[in-house]
Image (tube, rainbow, N blue to C red):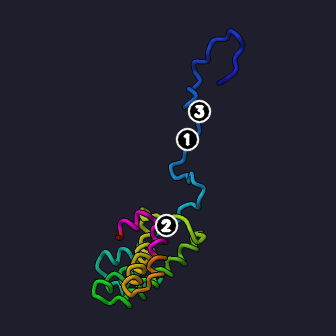
Amino acid sequence: MRDKPHGAAADTHAPPAWARLEPMTIHENLLGGPPPTHLPDDPEPRELLANGTPPADVAAKYPTSSLAWAQLADDAFERGSVVESYAYARTGYHRGLDALRRSGWKGHGPVPWEHEPNRGFLRSLHALARAAGSIGEQEEYERCTQFLKDSSPTAAQTLS
């Protein structure tokens, strides 16, 4: 509150104290961890897949697209080709790690599912955990499952 001379009238034009507080940023990290990583948008592979282009064609045209590799992994898993699914998922996972690092990720911290360009990496990570579990690679299954939960609780819940 402002100091005023003794006996002076109150300043009726000053905003109330609550209005002078600094607003809190909605995305402010109050826990002190690393900020969320948001991969750059790459709409072409997503649009091709949405329009029915075979995932193998999309992966061949956009080999860095984790989304195309995740779709290949899902398709292979659905038809019972678990080892093939594992290989596709691992490729998408590593392509995603490369993209995350280029975006400033330091090996940990949130990778939000809510940011659509992150979904290819998160889907590949989920597919890798699923395939690892299916072939009895328990340590890899546990590592990938925990990594997914740590990266995005929403993705872990959505993809389960």
| Amino acid type shown at disc 3 | Arg
The span from disc 2 to disc 1 (Cα, nearest Å) is 29 Å
Task: Name the secondary structure under disc 2.
Answer: helix
Region in magenta? 145-158
Q: In this view, does 10 lie above or below 158?
A: above
Q: How crowded is mark 1: few (under 14 residues within 10 Å), some or many (20 or more)?
A: few
The span from disc 3 to disc 2 (Cα, nearest Å) is 37 Å
Quarter of image, res 32: bottom right
Quarter of image, res 55: bottom left
Q: Is residue 10 above or below residue 102?
A: above
At x 42% / y 88%, what residue is drawn? 87
Task: Name the secondary structure under disc 3.
Answer: helix
At x 54% / y 48%, what residue is drawn? 25
Task: Name the secondary structure under disc 1.
Answer: loop
> In the image, which is nearer the foreground, mark 3 or mark 2?
2
- Residue 23, label in figure: 1
User: Who comes first in sequence, dot 3 or dot 2?
Assistant: 3
Question: Is residue 140 located in the magenta-colored stretch of the structure?
Answer: no
The residue indicated by pointer 2 is 150
Foreground: 152 or 53?
A: 152
Question: Is residue 153 located in the magenta-colored stretch of the structure?
Answer: yes
Q: In this view, does 93 lie above or below 60?
A: above
Magenta: main secondary structure equals helix
The span from disc 1 to disc 3 (Cα, nearest Å) is 9 Å
At x 59% / y 39%, what residue is drawn? 22
- Residue 20, label in figure: 3
The quarter of the image holding the N terminus is: top right
Residue at the limit of the structure toward the top, as seen here: 7
Instruction: Please state the horizontal and vertical placement of residue 103, each as a whole percent of the image.
Output: 57, 70
Q: Are marks 1 and 3 in contact (CB under 8 Å)?
A: no
| Amino acid type shown at disc 1 | Pro
Q: Is residue 50 visible?
A: yes
